[in-house]
Image: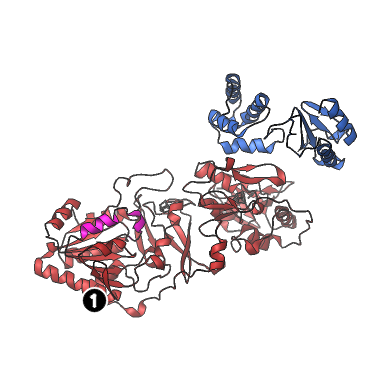
Chain colours: A blue, B red
């Protein structure tokens, strides 16, 4: 059973009072859950829906729109490879495929040892340094497959 | 009221109208998907483009208010070109499977393409694959590939049914309609989403693959499902009725109707109907024509009154007949037979006052108000207890029952039939077949009646609004209205030359019947 910690519950309540429309509090609340748990389990959506008095469907709409929210558990190292326009044109998709292959994982699925997840994501706002990826909280830019693999290995993948 | 010009014609529209409302009010055609008069404005399909003099760019008509002196058109080349491209974009990932799509023939995409599109498609991209045949709930099936993401269904569950089941999930060309974690779309208004879905994305489990819509005819009617009296249109062909959909009436049902009401075509069809007269008892019936049954029943009625006086007969009515029929029947009883023994059979007194806040009411009769008013205007005050005592004391020899045509909403059918059968004879007027009649010992006449779709008349709904309706089609040619029965009861004749033909009844086409299953 998913349970929201007391602090997180207070956080959500505070967010709710901050905005004119309570829908605005969905994103910060989902991020909070993700920070606590590493990902956003479906039960969390039900809990938030009750707490925020927003239909589950509308929270899910936000959750599923953004690639930044993890809908499944992710590995210790989460490599989010941008495959949006600028990056795609500079080899982002090939980069994602190469990473999946060298770490023997599928797009968005955590490796069996829980070390790494490689997922394709939408634009991360760093188009000028395409192709790029975000590893946990860090941007790594101007990548080639070799460089990306090396960086990830250095980080312990 | 601002004066504006639409495509060169000056018109006046109410203050605060949007441009699309002005177009609709004046009957000028405009391409659109996402706007619906009963829902909020979403402005997502971008097809209702218009050109407004003085504005550099095209605007969407559904989200732009009219202002005094606006000069608007949707016929210039730039508008036409924009709409054409808009349609082309809507079809980038559309599977174009019209031949196997149940919406074909009444599809927004087909209609708008023929009116505003007619281009050669320029999209050569691979189509995005999505889910087909998604079981959304007990009534609705979703085909995600056909969905154009107009959000009408989502707005419906948010704003009208207020059940919030639906949402649009994922992003960009992978967007899909769905429910949360496979929860069903289950509310008593769910099938309205099928009506407002402009394409074949949402289809009705009850209707899909049963008929091609261009083979169906349409007639206006009133839903007999409850005392709200939603305005509806009925689709039928030579086999019978196939579906009921709502018809707009701002004062009664807006644009909607409930799912329960949509089933009220079923009891009308031939296989549930009494098709001829029956005379007998304890399940041994002699089949006679409806006319003969009515004639001999009338004779019995008149003889009984002559022998034992007017109090030896009684009439029981349900709230399922028209005002005109009540009037005719009550006149016959009170004037010709001089009997005031007229009783109102209430099927569900406990739930009669229930209301779900939207449309559906606990009084599952279309004309309870009508029968109560008619009883009042004839100053009839007989109580149900009187009937009880007079039946058990054998004072009443013949009881005439105008039973329900929608039997499913009378949970007390069997019990009441046994109760009435305490009389020596029972004249049972009904559209449907009733199993319970086979068990009783009273000498019984069964006389087939017409259902709401086969006659003209009026129902008074719970608000006191008298709503008239006309004959749509005829399922059982022999069946009578109550007024016709009264003619025969009193020894008159009906003009048989004027009577219509029966319909053939539903034939099962196995290939499509099986395909319809999920
Ligand atoms: S399912 Fe139909 S009504 Fe709902 S968004 Fe798609 S096209 Fe619109
Ligand atoms: S609310 Fe009543 S009248 Fe309206 S559709 Fe439903 S059953 Fe019929
Ligand atoms: S497209 Fe990759 S960061 Fe913008
Ligand atoms: S009808 Fe105006 S944008 Fe869809």
Residue A106: where, in percent of width, then height? 76, 39
Residue B466: where, in percent of width, then height? 35, 56
What chain letter is assigned to the residue under label 1?
B
Q: Quadrant of residue B497?
A: bottom left
Question: Hey, which residue is sitting farthest front in the picture?
Answer: A113
| Residue B42 can be seen, yes or no | yes
Residue A23 lies left or right of residue A113; in this view the side is left
Residue B477: where, in percent of width, then height? 37, 74
Please state the extent of the stretch shown in magenta in the rendering.
B404-420
Residue at image location 63% in from the left, 38% down from the top: A61
Q: Nearer the viewer, residue A114 or B151?
A: A114
Vertical position of residue B211 compared to residue B223: above or below:
below
Q: Nearer the viewer, residue B430 or A113?
A: A113
Identify the residue under disc 1. Answer: B492
Residue at image location 81% in from the left, 35% down from the top: A103
Vertical position of residue B476 compared to residue A133: above or below:
below
Residue B365: where, in percent of width, then height? 34, 54
Vertical position of residue B136 compared to residue A123: above or below:
below
Residue B117 lies left or right of residue B159; in this view the side is right
């Amino acid at each position: 059973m998913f349970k929201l910690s007391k602090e997180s519950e207070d956080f959500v309540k505070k967010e709710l009072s901050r905005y004119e429309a309570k829908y605005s509090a969905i994103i910060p609340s989902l991020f909070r859950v993700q920070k606590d748990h590493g990902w956003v389990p479906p039960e969390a959506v039900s809990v938030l829906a009750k707490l925020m008095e927003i239909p589950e469907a509308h929270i899910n709409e936000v959750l599923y729109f953004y690639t930044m929210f993890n809908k499944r558990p992710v590995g210790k190292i989460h490599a989010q490879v941008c495959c949006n326009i600028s990056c795609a044109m500079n080899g982002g998709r090939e980069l994602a495929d190469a990473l999946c292959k060298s770490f023997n994982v599928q797009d968005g699925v955590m490796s069996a040892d829980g070390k790494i997840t490689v997922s394709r994501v939408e634009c991360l706002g760093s188009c000028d340094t395409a192709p790029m990826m975000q590893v946990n909280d860090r941007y790594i830019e101007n990548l080639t497959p070799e460089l990306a693999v090396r960086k990830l290995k250095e980080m312990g993948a | 009221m601002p004066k504006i010009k639409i495509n060169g014609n000056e018109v006046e529209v109410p203050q605060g109208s949007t441009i699309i409302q002005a177009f609709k009010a004046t009957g000028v055609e405009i391409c659109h998907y996402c706007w619906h008069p009963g829902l909020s404005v979403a402005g997502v399909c971008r097809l209702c483009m218009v050109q407004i003099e003085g504005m550099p760019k095209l605007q969407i008509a559904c989200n732009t208010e009219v202002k005094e002196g606006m000069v608007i058109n949707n016929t210039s080349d730039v508008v036409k070109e924009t709409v054409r491209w808009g349609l082309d974009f809507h079809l980038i990932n559309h599977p174009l499977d019209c031949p196997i799509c149940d919406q074909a023939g009444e599809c927004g995409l087909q209609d708008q393409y023929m009116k505003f599109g007619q281009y050669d498609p320029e999209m050569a991209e691979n189509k995005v694959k999505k889910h087909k045949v998604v079981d959304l709930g007990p009534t609705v099936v979703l085909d995600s590939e056909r969905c154009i993401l107009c959000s009408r269904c989502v707005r419906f569950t948010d704003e009208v049914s207020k059940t919030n089941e639906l949402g649009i999930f994922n992003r960009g060309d992978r967007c899909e309609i769905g429910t949360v974690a496979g929860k069903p779309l289950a509310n008593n208004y769910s099938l309205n989403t099928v009506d407002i879905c402009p394409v074949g994305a949402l289809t009705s489990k009850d209707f899909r693959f049963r008929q091609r819509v261009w083979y169906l005819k349409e007639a206006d009617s009133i839903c007999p499902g409850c005392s709200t009296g939603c305005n509806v249109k009925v689709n039928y062909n030579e086999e019978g009725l196939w579906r009921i959909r709502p018809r707009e009436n701002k004062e009664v049902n807006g644009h909607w109707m409930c799912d329960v009401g949509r089933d009220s075509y079923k009891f009308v069809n031939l296989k549930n109907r009494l098709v001829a007269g029956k005379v007998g008892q304890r399940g041994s019936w002699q089949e006679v024509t409806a006319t003969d049954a009515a004639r001999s029943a009338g004779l019995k009625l008149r003889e009984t009154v002559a022998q034992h006086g007017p109090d030896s007969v009684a009439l029981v009515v349900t709230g399922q007949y028209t005002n005109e029929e009540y009037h005719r029947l009550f006149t016959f009883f009170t004037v010709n037979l001089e009997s005031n023994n007229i009783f109102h059979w209430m099927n569900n007194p406990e739930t009669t006052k229930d209301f779900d806040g939207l449309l559906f009411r606990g009084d599952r009769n279309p004309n309870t108000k009508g029968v109560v008013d008619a009883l009042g205007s004839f100053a009839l005050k007989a109580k149900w207890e009187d009937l009880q005592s007079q039946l058990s004391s054998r004072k009443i020899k013949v009881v005439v029952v105008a039973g329900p045509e929608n039997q499913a909403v009378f949970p007390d059918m069997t019990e009441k039939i046994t109760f009435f059968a305490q009389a020596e004879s029972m004249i049972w007027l009904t559209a449907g077949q009733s199993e319970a009649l086979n068990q009783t010992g009273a000498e019984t006449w069964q006389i087939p009646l017409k259902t709401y779709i086969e006659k003209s008349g009026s129902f008074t709904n719970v608000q006191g609004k008298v709503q008239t309706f006309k004959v749509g089609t005829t399922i059982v040619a022999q069946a009578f209205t109550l007024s016709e029965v009264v003619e025969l009861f009193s020894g008159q004749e009906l003009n048989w030359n004027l009577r219509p033909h029966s319909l053939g009844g539903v034939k099962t086409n196995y290939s499509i019947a099986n395909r319809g299953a999920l």
